[in-house]
Amino acid sequence: MANDGSPMRVSYGEYVYEHVPGWAPLPDGWEWNHVVGVGVDSQDNIYAYNRSAHPMIVLDKGGGIQATWGEDVFTTAHHLFVGPDDTLYTTDIGDDTVRKWSSKGEQLLMLGTPNEPAEPFSGKPFNKPTDVALGHDGSIYVTDGYGNARVHQFTPDGSLIRSWGERGSGPGQFQIPHSICVDDTGLVYVADRENSRIQVFQADGQYLREWRGVHRPDHILQGADGHFYVAELGWRQGLSPTQPTPNAISHPSGVKILNSEGGWLGGWGMSTDTPGDIIAGHALAIDSEGSIYVGETLDGARLQKYIRVR
């Protein structure tokens, strides 16, 4: 493991990546602050949704800043989703909204009313919504969230279709539904973070199965290769005083790569501050070359790039 600024290789088997030291340096006076959402559009622009004075930072693959936007709009950034037409969807756990944007930062749609959250665990949208994904019919799926235990499905123009879920650890129940994605067949995957599992549903919310073997999953997406990429918070960060604290070495923050049945294919993570390791993985995205961008939260608060070694 290198800590002298030279590249470090991570992961196993066919899934080997090389960390890019010092990728995306910021101008003087700027700093990364909770890089909680990461997305890549069809032109390989990288969007870093974070909690700094520049909440949406747009970068090229070389790490150069192309634009910033969202100043004085976002309250507490959370996850980001880039649609097939390069529109962006954001969740804000500070003002309890979900918003749709053009790639230039023009607001196109807002779900929820700013600073008017639903009653905690009422099942109504929203109370600290966490993530967004689009169905094959354009439906907007939202995981909701820190103050709720639901998934909501909306029409493309924002009308509520249905909701499902409640607090608990049984099938279809959630303890912080933290991320959501829709696969190439239309199935819906929910990262049920504090239950340390991924739950799989039909498009209408019917429960199908769960995947174990993940440690507090923060984000899930399906890559172009059909496999699933999961950012894990692990057991080092964000635990409440009442939660158990398993060994952070055996349950580190990191990235896991899973097949379509939830089987392990690769991954890495050591929960250290060595460049290339991951302290508190919160979000990830993949560009057209297969490179992975990982955003970290809490005392990590970095954005790191890993190039696929073929």
Image: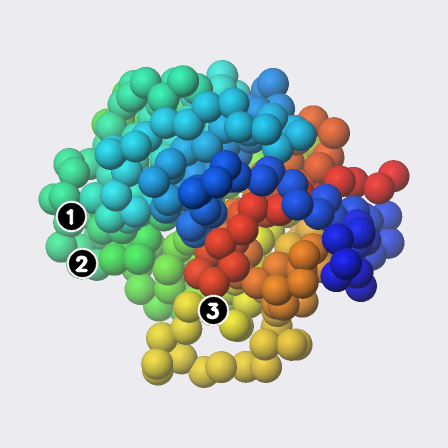
Quarter of the picture holding the C terminus: top right
Residue 288 spot, x, y in % from top left:
69, 27
Whether residue 12 sits left or right of residue 226 in the image: it is right
Residue 194 spot, x, y in % from top left:
43, 67
Q: Are marks 3 and 1 in contact (CB under 8 Å)?
A: no
Q: Are marks 2 and 1 in contact (CB under 8 Å)?
A: yes
Q: Which amino acid does label 3 sit on?
A: Gln
Nearer the observer: mark 3 or 1; the answer is 3
Seen in the picture, residue 266 relative to 159 is either above or below; the reply is: below
Q: Name the residue under label 2.
A: 120
Q: Which of the marked residues, 3 or 2, is nearer the chain's N terminus?
A: 2
Along the line of sight, the residue nearer the viewer: 212 or 255: 255
Q: Name the residue under label 3.
A: 237
Residue 100 spot, x, y in % from top left:
34, 26
Separation (CA) of disc 3 from disc 2: 24 Å
Q: Which amino acid does label 1 sit on?
A: Pro
The numbered disc on residue 117 is 1
